[in-house]
Amino acid sequence: MSNLSFMEKLLDGVEVEWIALGEVAKIGTGNSNRQDESENGIYPFYVRSKTILKSATFQFDETAIVVPGEGGIGDIFHYVEGKYALHQRAYRIHVSSDNLSTKFLYHFMSSSFKQYILMKSVGATSSSIRKPMLENFPIPIPCPNNPKKSLETQAEIVRILDTFTELTAELTARKKQYNYYRDQLLSFEEGEVEWKTLEEVSDIYDSLHQTPQYAESGLSMIRVTDIKGSYVNLEKTLRVNKEIFAQFTKKYLPKKNDLVMSRVGSYGNVGIVPVDDSACMGQNTVVIHPIINSKYLFYILVSNIGQSFIERNVSGGSQKTLSLKSIKAIPIPLVSDKEQERIATALDKFDALTSSITEGLPREIALRQQQYEYYRDLLLSFPKTDTEVTA
């Protein structure tokens, strides 16, 4: 018995039946679009990307898994309980079988769906999810002839895996608290402030639309993947030689406290340039040279003010793109220099406090995520049989 895998011990020799997801769940899309977003909405509005918006109305009241139809294919799953609205290009999976736990299905899809999509893409990168892909996705039902034992087995697997997500949930809660405080501080009554466009409060420079030749060493090039909020970590960027650097800074050489924004794919992310004259911009980015308080402008762009405008104005199909025209038009509430400084200082202190409270959590969460993925794949490594459904 000691040589048996953990899964074999848990199943204790029982059978596993593989069934197409469409046989045990209702799969469909919503009927809303981006125009149905409401800033004051109380219901989560799941769209075709990773972003979760708000809606004043709901379409479904249930336990389900929501899968965006585009963006992060095979990587993004939302476990939903209660009322929610759904975009017409996002899918809901509502379990209709008494022998299947929705949370168990959620963990299994997180483990296996991406590989399934890649196999069905015949070497290409899938740009969108279609309903038949979900309907034909094979899922395991342990102990198919004993519903009680089946659900007990699924529940035990869920219990173990959920323990690895608790710390991440704690950090997420703290992040939500910070975002709430930030958005409250940046809420302005009508007529209280003067509204300008981003173009009116900064100089904006588009990057070259070409891929450079990278070097083993040299100067930093900031790409879309390097823009993740706060100060850009130049130590982790790719490098270019002096000739390439000069070519990519011909329009503008980024300065300390300039802002950089991603335009394509992971669009709308904002970062701060940490030092003068040490980085150039990679393709699909813009650099923003503020003529107002740089930190204040950063907080506006990452707040609900900036991000909701970006979400309403992004365009494109599988590769979402934020146009330079839309970036220039982002609305910016203009307050006095003193008030800009006060708001920026308050948010800096709150951010520092949050970081202090959660000191060490990012590393711990990374380790927990590794543990979660290891045990998830171990716990969900169900044996394949000749009767496994073929999609």
Image (cartoon, rainbow, N blue to C red):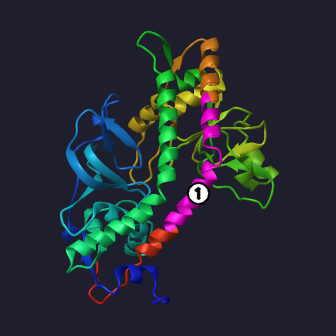
The location of residue 28, given as percent across then percent down, is 22, 56
Residue in view at x 75 percent, y 55 percent: 239
- Does residue 186 appear in the picture of this structure? no
**Closer to the camera in the image, 303 or 222:** 303
**Which residue sits furthest front?**
1
Residue that mark 1 sits on: 366
- Does residue 66 appear in the picture of this structure? yes
Q: Which amino acid does label 1 sit on?
A: Ala
User: Which corner quadrant of the image does residue 41 belong to?
Assistant: top left
**Closer to the camera in the image, 391 or 289:** 391
The location of residue 367, given as percent across then percent down, is 59, 60
**Residue neighbourhood size for the residue with mark 1, other residues' Cα within 10 Å, grouped as few (<14), some (14–19), many (≥20):** few
Residue 365's place in the image compared with 230, above or below, is: below
Left or right: where 319 falls relative to 204: left
Left or right: where 70 falls relative to 234: left
Residue in view at x 26 percent, y 87 percent: 387
Residue 205's place in the image compared with 345, above or below, is: below
Residue in view at x 54 percent, y 41 percent: 269
The location of residue 306, given as percent across then percent down, is 48, 31
Q: Is residue 21 magenta?
A: no
**Which residue sits furthest top?**
191
Region in magenta: 350-373
Q: What element carries label 1?
A: helix
Q: Does the magenta stretch include residue 364?
A: yes
**Closer to the camera in the image, 25 or 135:** 25
The location of residue 58, given as percent across then percent down, is 22, 40
Residue 213's place in the image compared with 255, above or below, is: below
- In the rendered image, which quarter contains the C terminus? bottom left
User: Which corner quadrant of the image does residue 45 belong to?
Assistant: top left
Residue in view at x 26 percent, y 48 percent: 88
User: Which corner quadrant of the image does residue 390 belong to?
Assistant: bottom left
